[in-house]
Amino acid sequence: PAATLERLFERLHDAKTQEEAEGVARLIQRRWARSGSDTADLLMTRAQKALQDKQTEIAIELLDRIISLQPDWAEAWNQRANALYIAGDSIRSMLDIGETLKREPRHYGAMMGLGLILRQQGDDKGAMIAFRKALTIYPEFDAVKKAVDSLKSEVDGRDA
């Protein structure tokens, strides 16, 4: 499976169109979404449902349990980072993003999340670094391309 994930990342990087890139990204996300534990996968489904239903506290509790069951599952850390961000806890969210990237350094979604938090905190340069790093992995990532465009004139136009 690792070799196929490698191949998917090559395809993501080399995709010629946004449609092609999005298709490959979906395959990568499907791979990330599997923990190898039926219990953890079931809890993740429940955590995502709780988030959709705006039950952020419940989602965080479920994600805490998932992480204690599967501490090496990058996507569990990423999902908890999202839930913490929604709950207004950007500091803990950033810590979980760090844990995500430790386990999956190519997690472009986590990089985008980091960029959004840094931008909110007024660290435009840091945000730009995170966004551009995501684009080195997923050049056709539309949301990140838009974020970079909106930041570019502000950041690049300023003196360091």
Image (cartoon, rainbow, N blue to C red):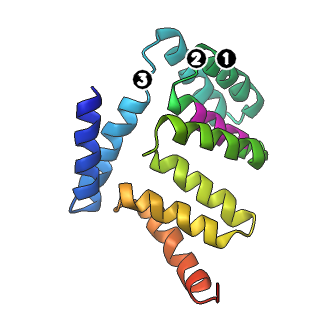
Q: Are marks 3 and 2 in contact (CB under 8 Å)?
A: no
Q: Earlier in the sequence, mark 1 or mark 2?
A: 2
Side (left or right) of 60 relative to 12: right
Q: Earlier in the sequence, mark 3 or mark 2?
A: 3
For badge 3, the amino acid type reads Arg
Q: CA distance from mark 3 to mark 2?
A: 12 Å
- Magenta stretch encompasses residue 64: no
> Nearer the viewer's eye, disc 3 or disc 2?
3
For badge 1, the amino acid type reads Arg
The N terminus sits in image quarter: top left
Q: CA distance from mark 1 to mark 3?
A: 16 Å
Picture residue at 29% right of the left edge, 35% below the top: 5
Dot 1 corresponds to which residue? 65
Residue 108 location, x and y as percent?
Answer: 46, 50
Q: CA distance from mark 1 to mark 2?
A: 8 Å
Picture residue at 55% right of the left edge, 84% below the top: 156
Dot 2 corresponds to which residue? 43
Side (left or right) of 93 relative to 6: right
Which portion, as a residue range, is magenta? Answer: 77-84
Dot 3 corresponds to which residue? 34
